Amino acid sequence: MKLISLNIWGGRIREPLLKFITNYKDVNIFCFQELYNNANDPMSGEQRQPDLTIFTELKKLLPNHSAFFRPTIRNEYGIGMFVKKEIEVVEEGEIILRSVPNFSGSGGDHTRNMQWVKCSVNNKNFVVMNVHGLWTGIDKKDNPDRLKQSERIKKIS
């Protein structure tokens, strides 16, 4: 079983990302963070613009995988998993780790969720979880919110 987890930064480095995915298209499970799914706007003021349709592009690149998207902002931005179709997906869902229902789309932090898939291979079940943790700025130091998030994930797993 091979799994790749990758923060794709909204597809801002598009061509190298697509080449990487193409080179590893036979991986069993991909877990991606910072996915745009047919978004109306980039939700940030960064200079380098994201690919607002990167989830659709990845589905085209990975036709032998089932795609699952879990939004964190306006059903347009979030996390996603691609599971090879030969792997039975028994269930798929999410757990909200931190809710920010009125997030405007720029500045501050947004809702954080943990996506999961329960799979079965050769009558053996396993669960894969995908999460983009709280971001605390450039220094990425821990704080009480990040520690609470980790404790919550630890209890779930």
Image (cartoon, rainbow, N blue to C red):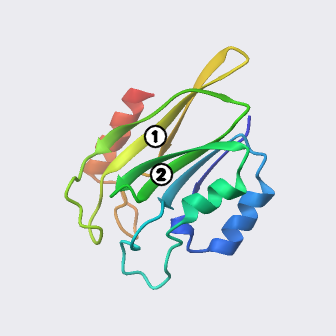
- What numbered label is drawn on residue 90? none
Q: Amino acid at mark 1?
A: Gln
* Residue behind mark 1: 115
**Residue visible at 36% across and 68% down in the picture:** 137
Q: Nearer the viewer, residue 52 or 100?
A: 52
Q: Position of residue 135 (x, y in %)?
A: 37, 60
Q: Residue furthest bottom?
A: 47
* Residue behind mark 2: 79
Q: Position of residue 45 (x, y in %)?
A: 36, 81
**Residue visible at 58% across and 59% down in the picture:** 56
Q: Residues within 10 Å of mark 1 (few under 14, many from 20)?
A: many
Q: Nearer the viewer, residue 52 or 108?
A: 52
Which of the 4 quarters of the picture holds residue 67? top right
Work out whether mark 2 precedes mark 1 in sequence or the reverse, and give the earlier one.
2
Q: Position of residue 73 (x, y in %)?
A: 34, 58
Kindly check if marks 2 and 1 are in contact, taking CB atoms under 8 A apart as contact: yes
Q: Amino acid at mark 2?
A: Ile
